[in-house]
Image (spheres, grey):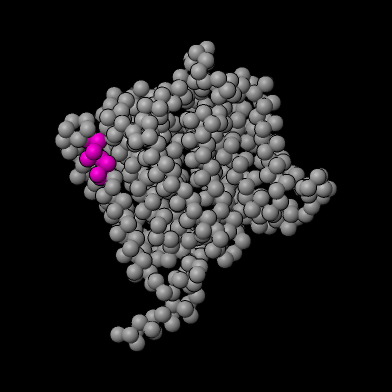
Amino acid sequence: MSEVAEAPVLMPAKRRAAQLAMLAFAVVIVMAAYANVGLALDGQIPAGMLTYGLGLGGLMLAAYLVLAKFAPWADPLILPLVTLVNGLGLVMIYRLENSGSKLQAGASATQQIIMTGIGVVLFAVTLIVLRDQRMLQRMTYTAGLIGVLLLISPLIPGLGKEINGARIWIGFGPATIQPAEFAKIALVIFFAGYLVAKRDVLALAGRRLLFIDLPRARDLGPVLITWGVSIGVLVLQKDLGSSLLLFGGFVIMLYVATQRTSWVLIGVLLFVGGAWLAGQLFSHVGDRFDVWLDPGNQAYYDRPFGGSFQIMQGLFGLGAGGVMGTGLGQGHPELIPLAFSDFIFPATGEEIGLTGLMALLMIYALIVQRGLRTSLAARDPFSKLLAGGLSFTLAWQVFIIVGGVTNLIPLTGLVTPFMSQGGSALLANWILIALLVRMSDAARQPPPQAIQNEGMTQVFQR
């Protein structure tokens, strides 16, 4: 039986109670991990454990109350799962803060929980203001314009800043923002609205090559424009991660909208060909591929852009952790560069081992699965594409960062969602979750007649 059909049987009050219990359980797991780190480092419970526990618990309780009021039929698993990942990231940043790791200026567990609080506020504001996700369809081209402006804003002289070899930041005094994190949401909204309007045209077949129906040449414009923008991001901003995220998200949404495998093949060929050409013409792109193909080559350790030293240290850390890990607080994550952001995954893997990392990836997989389930249950084409696109964006980002730090694919510079230190990614991902929750509420809410019948049944039972 589908979830939509089950919804009238399990009323929101009962589901909210179950959700609150799962939320409390997630906070308890986080606090147990926090205590474990303190015991391993100093032989005692950390002095700030109560403060962090109450802070995290209070924030998630506030998120739960907003959810219960403004999206009572939403999927009950999404918020507890996100809480668990966000909380484990908080624990790991506390661990790094007390291990001698070289953190970014201002990076600390306290700063992370403050940014989590701001993220929860944005989550709540999104749910309160956006009562119907279909309103976003009317803003299709506005969202596209905003997304493109955010992408190119780091290239503006005096506004953009280059950090660690990539020009993906904009600065306002000491504060910096990574606009691409917010651009990904705006562009997914644009892609969903555009593809809903144009999918019948884009689904038309042209010539047949072997067993594949190719699209018509006149319909290649959108994919070529998106490809050009993604290659521009790669070359001008030196940001392989955002480039992959942008183009990969568009191609997959195009496939979902049209059911044409040929679009995926064309997308893969375009991106691989464009990346190879950029690698031949631009040294900073070529360095990424050299390091990926031969990370053990000491000549690549100190490359000015994306040297292999950090990759090798991350791989050594994962190897030291083995299957079960060294234990929280008992490894040496301080030996891994950028352990607080780009390399928090291998730093965590050293202490929780392969088993713990598989559990962590399963939590991400569950969040994505709930998003995809929302996409399948959605009642209008725009919501289906938007939920699917946002879910894939989250999954694709996890794959890109995990693939990069394990040397499966070239290192990109993206951060692990909800875990890595940094405000832009954390805030953007909380907005992304709010959009998924809003669509989940609309998809799972039963027809008014079903709710009325259930209420009458309960009255007669009393």
Asked whether 272 falls inside the magenta stretch, the response is no
**Magenta-highlighted residues:** 31-38
Asked whether 35 falls inside the magenta stretch, the response is yes
Residue 66, given in percent of the width and then of the height, sits at: 36, 60
In-front residue for pair 345/304: 345
In-front residue for pair 21/241: 21
In-front residue for pair 438/186: 438
Residue 132, given in percent of the width and then of the height, sits at: 51, 63
On the rendered structure, is 214 left or right of 51? right
* Residue at (55% x, 24% y) in the render: 292
Q: Residue furthest front?
A: 323
* Residue at (31% x, 65% y) in the render: 17
Residue 383, quarter of picture: bottom right
In-front residue for pair 190/316: 316
On the rendered structure, is 394 left or right of 340? right
On the rendered structure, is 281 left or right of 373? right
Q: Residue furthest right?
A: 207
Residue 69, given in percent of the width and then of the height, sits at: 37, 65
Q: Visible in this render: residue 462?
A: yes
Q: Residue furthest bottom?
A: 460
On the rendered structure, is 186 left or right of 337? right
The answer to whether 363 is drawn above or below residue 92 in the figure is: below
Q: Visible in this render: residue 160?
A: no
The answer to whether 279 is drawn above or below residue 401 in the figure is: above
* Residue at (62% x, 47% y) in the render: 252
* Count of numbered marks: 0
Helix, strand or loop for the magenta stretch, by majority: helix
Residue 344, given in percent of the width and then of the height, sits at: 39, 33
